[in-house]
Image: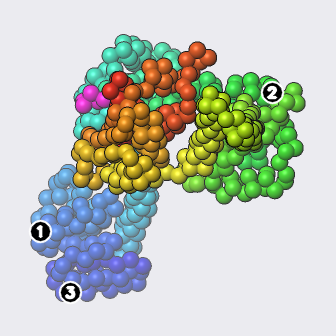
Amino acid sequence: MAEIQLLLAGAGNRRAISSLLADRHTPVVADEIRDVPLYLVDEPSFLEHRDALKRHKRAQDPVFCPVVLIRRENASTTVTLPDITTSERPLVVNEVVTAPVGKQALFRTVSNLLVRRAQTEELATDLQERNERLREERRKYQTLVEQSESGIAVAQNGEFAFANERMREIAERDSLIGVPVENIVAPEYRTVVRDRYRKRVAGEQLPTQYEVAIETPAGGRKDIDLRASRISYDGAPAVLVLFQDVTRRKERERDLRKFESAVEHAGHAIIITDTDGTIEYVNPAFEEMTGYAAEEAIGANPRILKSGDHGEAFYRELWQTILDGEVWTSETVNERKSGERIVLNQTISPIQDADGEINGFVAIQDDITDHRLREQQLVVFERVLRHNLRNKGTAIRGYADVLKRSLGDEASTAHLDAIQENVQSLLDISEKAHHVRQIFTDRIEADGDCALESALERLRDRVGSAYPDAEISLEGELGQSVEIDARVTPAFRELVENAVKHSDAPSPRVAITVAVGDATATVTVVDNGSGIPDHERRVIEAGTEDPLEHGSGLGLWFAYWLVSYVGGDIDIQASPEGTAIGVTVPLR
């Protein structure tokens, strides 16, 4: 049952047609056009409703909206033929029935028209669904193209006909439409790009992927992974291109090659393992240091190097440290493939990704076997030498003292005094060597700052108290608040004490002067003694000794080592009137 609007003149006509239709349909009587499946209109009302019907039918298109005109038999025609057959689509009138209207004929006409309407509704619904699917596919396509991480473009007639936003970002241009493709390509690639574009459009089979470089308007350069394929665009041959900016990847590859070269040529042994400790890489220095070839080490565990000198607790602490993401540093005794022991200074660090997850470990090993042996030898030699010198020297001094009391002549006494002085000098050197070793072993790591002026004032007062006959002055650029490495202050004391102790002047004078620069301070110690011998000065300035030219003591060496350790420099100017030793150290 369908609603049918009656657009008829005269109440009698409306009642008659309503009564006729009521068996199968629902008549609707209204002056305004309603949205119903079908309309019945007579000639007297047609002109009144014609424009409204035409607008309604256009609004409903493509759904068929039927209008049936009721024309009285033998009545003068008021609705012209074009309104029925030849007016612009859609036609205002679709069928004409003649009054008096036969019931069966009217129902047949109405039924046919309603079937046509139902069919067009189904077609319209299907078309709407298809159009919606097409619009959805288009939206998906646009989303994929516009949000793609790759630059997507279409080149036609040698120019860009389409480019997505990512493509414009890579090329660093606001628009690419109409820009010749070769204009953005680096000069050395323009010929190959032009040639491949021409051949591809012509249908030749070419590699779909290759690398090029492009230039940005600002003069920058980018490495591009380019993929190209022939397509039809707007009915004409074109080339679809995908640009992937691989500049960072290329930079990482170059950095990786540099790193690999550095690792391969490093003087330290380098081992990389997975999280279980299985060796994945060793460098040539490892092969040379351990005697294991890379093929033997890779796939094995570093325990192949264990010497047995370290207990399980040592390795438990090692693994706990690196699994916690911290760096492990220790001296380790390992064993070469030949069975020789080797002492290593070893650092093991976890390899972590961007999320902090540990992916493996890298160990850097430095062979300090010779260094440790030399250190042991020096310790033993220093202990034995100092022990023997102290014991034997004390005995010699005692015997010399006994001889002095038993011998009365002046010549013998003078010789015994010389013996005692030389023995005492040797004992002093022994104590100095022990003192130097203690300082470098126990104190050299004690990093800290100190105020230069305060340190020199304390030094002047302390040495002045120890040597009351000496005149010690402090002058120069004082009053400035500058700080230096505290580890160099024993060197200043050594130089000032040496200047006083070894002065042969009747009244020793030592002048300490200070000069402060932008990044350094220079402390100069000047005495009035006879000057440091040339060979002593040359040895210190050269920094080496040999059997023919060497220093007679440790004092200057001690000062030189400390000054060098903190990054400073020492300069000695000697003359018969005295010695000037300048020490330049960096400011903290």
Q: On residue 12, which mark appears?
A: 3
Which residue is rendered at x = 23% and y = 61% of the image? 58
- Where does the image place residue 153, in percent across and percent down from the top left? 37, 33
Q: Nearer the viewer's eye, disc 2 or disc 1?
A: 2
Above or below, 327 against 250 in this view is below
Which residue type carries mark 1? Leu
Residue 126 covered by magenta stretch: no
Which one is in front, 578 or 233?
578
199 to 32, vertically: above or below: above
- In the displayed structure, does residue 71 sit left or right of residue 582? left
The local secondary structure at tag 2 comes to loop
**According to the image, label 1 marks what residue?**
47
Q: Name the residue under label 2.
A: 292
Q: Nearer the N terminus, badge 1 or badge 3?
A: 3
Mark positioned earlier in the residue sequence (3 or 2): 3
Question: For mark 3, does the 10 Å Cα neighbourhood hold few (<14), some (14 to 19), or many (20 or more) residues?
Answer: few
**Distance of label 1 from label 3 (alpha carbons):** 20 Å
